Image (tube, rainbow, N blue to C red):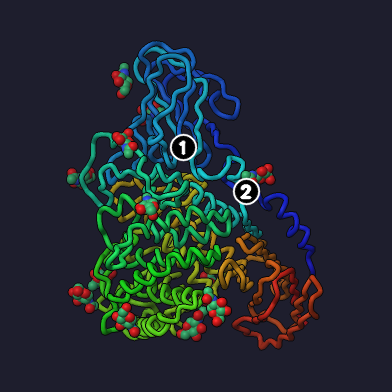
């Protein structure tokens, strides 16, 4: 069966395919979608919703909560009409419906709730708030009027501030798309993309950290917490930060998940570069040590062995996705100094001994930790790829033998054959989600059976709300679960990866306490919106880039469009559809456009596929072994070569993949039928 696909391929240049799923607004002026709740006497609150607002009158003590229908961000503007003297209107925000109040906003500090903003209109006119009072994430906005008298609000609108470097009519101009027959999966892909747009801010309005008290303070603030965003966190005109409401800081770990999701959806690499640069600007000149996070958090002087490495992974990812050779060259000596710093923690065991507990707010990070060592192993291999691109042979022997030493020692000292998982370190029986997921992702495992065992072991722990991160007590970490998805697919079970997306991201997208548009930072294994590392539930961020793992994985691993070398000069098309029947995905890099459409026949046997890669590139095709005997025909649609016919003799239990290499960029078609 051949499906006519190329009509879709070429229309891509004209309009964004599947545009109806994109959550980003088409204008920066946003008005409420609906009224959530009214208190006291507010005449015509509904008139303030929709695009043609009419006045509403607040009389005496009264309030309205508006719903924007999705998480948004920005500056609030009120157009005031007739007003009595001495009137006040307060403005409060909340991402979750749990923290709606006319008195306080949800939280950005360790404890307490954020203070309201106040407007005291002197007469008719448009009133706004100082720029540092932009709210980085909210779905609900409440206006409350105190005292006697009345005031007319003719309009309440938000100036949407994310993606400051994009024109208003560019916010929805995605460079990538994803579609399959499962609507939940489609919505997850697009919500991931939008979450990252929400986390892309004007760098002059980063978190000023008024108290520099972020982690686990247990004092209770009973008075409203002052908040403002006016710290310049990077150079340039846009920055990728961890969260929209909070922290509004650069964190390299978060970028390891966010950046792939950005590349496959709207390819905003300049914000990634600005954020990476802000971390290298803080590198210790003598030791090579990189900061845990960007300014002003860096003032705390905390070292994290993993986030240090994530910054290096950030450079490797940036080069892979951008092909920007000059940028790589400019950072290479700093990269090598940073790697030497990490290698200095390797002891006689062959493993790195982690001496600082800071990581993604898990507990027990230290010693010969499996997560940290897997990340180091991964980074060393990424560094060898970079060194090869740069023809730098000076590091090859050292890094190759360091990597081999880590792998051998991790398997000898940390693999627990009875559990079928790695221990956190050699003195514990805890088998962490982060380290086991990263072990598969990094290929520190030394046999495929270990990947399967880890995938199975992680699966057995799921609760109805997702995959627990037992190394962070009672927590589901959408960050670490993003690596777990990759681990299932890389272990050969894409169905299980998709199962986790539906379970965990389906909960995050559709639960009524969520924004139903962006992904939360963390929560409890029981589905409560309590995240174990924090004492203050209102503080949890509901738009966190580190929670967008499915977006990148669905395109790179499920649709299987893999960039092998910089910008996609070489590529591998390797779909792993799992239990999906039909997937259509594509994206563009500086090298050109990549697109795949793959379809399984309803009986599960035959399949067909078409793909397009840029002219002048080169790559390969990898397909899962079919369950029956038959013939696979690969056809160059440009007629540059003869059809390739692969005869598959099935023994009924085929494992592994059929790989064809040396394909020129262009349009290809693959058909397999059982015989
Ligand atoms: C509405 O009234 C409830 C109950 O008194 C209060 O908690 C809430 O803050 C009020 N909301 C607004 C917007 O005034
Ligand atoms: C209303 O709130 C403002 C700001 O907090 C305050 O100054 C004013 O006294 C309040 N008015 C009444 C009548 O409570
Ligand atoms: C975004 O796409 C729309 C519709 O195709 C187009 O009119 C607009 O010019 C694009 N905006 C930019 C900034 O490219
Ligand atoms: C803060 O509040 C919690 C819950 O009410 C309480 O258990 C804790 O003792 C308080 N901490 C301080 C420092 O007052
Ligand atoms: C940031 O905003 C706060 C609160 O408005 C203000 O006190 C402070 O001076 C501002 N800082 C800068 C650098 O603008
Ligand atoms: C901006 O760039 C300069 C020059 O490289 C650097 O010194 C400074 O730290 C950078 N600022 C930020 C916020 O990263
Ligand atoms: C080893 O792992 C356990 C469990 O995470 C942790 O409690 C312990 O502190 C770790 N050991 C070191 C040396 O960090
Ligand atoms: C790691 O280094 C610390 C600090 O130097 C030391 O106390 C600890 O024993 C080392 N851990 C291991 C597993 O060697
Ligand atoms: C690296 O070496 C290869 C083969 O020797 C050569 O073709 C290429 O130009 C070199 N690249 C650089 C950046 O020196
Ligand atoms: C790699 O080089 C570092 C110095 O940067 C050295 O301490 C280490 O022993 C070397 N490792 C190997 C495996 O050669
Ligand atoms: C993973 O490691 C094994 C050796 O343990 C190696 O055979 C295999 O090629 C590696 N896989 C990848 C994708 O690098
Ligand atoms: C793959 O995962 C699915 C869903 O968890 C499971 O039912 C199936 O047994 C797994 N397959 C293998 C080969 O482990």
Percent from the top left, x then y, of residue 403?
Answer: 39, 81
Q: Report which quarter residue 577 is drawn in.
A: bottom right
| Quadrant housing the N terminus | bottom right
Percent from the top left, x then y, of residue 329?
Answer: 47, 67
Residue 396, visible in the rendered structure: yes
Residue 315 to residue 418: above or below: above
Percent from the top left, x then y, of residue 535?
Answer: 28, 49
Identity of the residue drawn at 26% across and 84% down: 348
Residue placed under numbered mark 2 in the picture: 173
| Quadrant housing the C terminus | bottom right
Front residue of 90/450: it is: 90
Front residue of 209/658: it is: 209
* Left or right: residue 599 compared with residue 135: right
Identity of the residue drawn at 36% across and 36% down: 105
Q: Report which quarter residue 661 is drawn in.
A: bottom right
Secondary-structure class at tag 1: strand
């Amino acid at each position: 069966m051949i499906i006519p696909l190329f009509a879709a391929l070429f229309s891509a240049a004209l309009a964004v395919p599947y545009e109806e799923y994109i959550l980003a607004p088409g204008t920066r002026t946003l008005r409420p979608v609906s009224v959530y709740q009214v208190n006291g006497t507010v005449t015509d609150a509904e008139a303030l919703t929709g695009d043609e607002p009419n006045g509403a009158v607040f009389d005496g003590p009264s309030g309205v909560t508006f719903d924007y229908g999705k998480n948004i961000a920005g500056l609030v503007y009120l157009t005031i009409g007739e007003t009595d003297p001495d009137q006040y209107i307060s403005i409060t925000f909340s991402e979750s419906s749990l923290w709606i109040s006319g008195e306080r906003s949800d939280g950005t500090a360790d404890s307490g709730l954020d203070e309201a903003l106040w407007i005291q209109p002197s007469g008719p006119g448009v009133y706004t708030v100082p720029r540092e009072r932009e709210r980085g994430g909210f779905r609900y906005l409440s206006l409350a009027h105190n005292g006697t008298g009345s005031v007319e609000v003719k309009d309440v609108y938000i100036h949407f501030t994310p993606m400051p470097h994009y024109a208003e009519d560019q916010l929805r101009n995605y460079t990538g798309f994803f579609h399959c027959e499962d609507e939940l999966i489609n919505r997850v892909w697009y919500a991931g993309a939008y979450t990252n747009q929400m986390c892309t801010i004007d760098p002059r309005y980063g978190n000023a950290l008024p108290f520099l008290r972020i982690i686990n303070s247990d004092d209770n603030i009973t008075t409203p917490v002052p908040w403002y965003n006016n710290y310049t966190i990077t150079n340039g005109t846009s920055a990728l930060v961890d969260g929209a409401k909070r922290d509004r800081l650069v964190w390299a770990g978060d970028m390891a998940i966010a950046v792939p999701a950005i590349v496959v959806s709207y390819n905003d690499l300049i914000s990634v570069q600005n954020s990476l640069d802000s971390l290298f600007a803080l590198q210790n000149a003598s030791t090579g040590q990189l900061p845990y996070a960007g300014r002003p958090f860096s003032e705390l002087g905390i070292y994290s062995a993993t986030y240090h490495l994530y910054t290096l992974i950030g450079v490797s990812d940036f080069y892979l996705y951008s092909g920007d050779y000059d940028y790589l060259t400019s950072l290479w000596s700093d990269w090598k100094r940073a790697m030497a710093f990490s290698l200095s923690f390797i002891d006689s065991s062959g493993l790195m001994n982690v001496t600082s507990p800071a990581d993604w707010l898990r507990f027990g990070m230290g010693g010969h930790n499996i997560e940290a060592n897997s990340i180091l192993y991964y980074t060393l291999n990424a560094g060898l790829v970079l060194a090869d691109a740069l023809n730098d042979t000076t590091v090859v022997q050292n890094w190759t033998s360091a990597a081999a030493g880590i792998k051998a020692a991790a398997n000898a000292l940390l693999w627990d054959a009875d559990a079928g998982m790695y221990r956190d370190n050699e003195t514990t029986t805890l088998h962490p989600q982060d380290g086991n997921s990263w072990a598969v992702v990094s290929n520190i495992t030394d046999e495929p059976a270990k990947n399967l065992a880890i995938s199975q072991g992680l699966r057995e722990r799921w609760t109805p709300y997702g995959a627990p991160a037992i190394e962070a007590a009672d927590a589901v970490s959408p960050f670490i679960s993003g690596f777990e998805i990759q681990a299932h697919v890389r272990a050969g079970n894409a169905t299980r990866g998709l199962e986790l997306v539906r379970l965990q991201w389906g909960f995050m997208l559709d639960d009524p306490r969520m924004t139903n548009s962006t992904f939360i930072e963390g929560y409890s294994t029981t589905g409560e919106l309590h995240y174990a590392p924090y004492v203050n539930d209102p503080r949890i961020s509901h738009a966190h880039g580190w929670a967008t793992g499915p977006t990148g994985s669905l395109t790179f691993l499920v649709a299987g469009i893999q960039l092998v070398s910089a910008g996609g000069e070489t590529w591998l098309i390797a779909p792993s559809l799992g239990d999906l029947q039909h997937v259509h995905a594509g994206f563009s890099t500086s090298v050109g456009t990549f697109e795949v459409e793959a379809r399984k026949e309803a009986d599960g046997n035959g399949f067909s596929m078409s793909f397009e890669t840029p002219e002048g590139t080169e790559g390969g095709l990898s397909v899962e072994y079919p369950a029956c005997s038959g013939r696979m025909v690969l056809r160059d649609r440009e007629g540059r070569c003869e059809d390739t016919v692969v005869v598959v003799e099935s023994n009924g239990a085929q494992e592994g993949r059929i790989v064809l290499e040396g394909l020129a960029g262009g349009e290809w078609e693959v058909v397999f039928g059982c015989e």
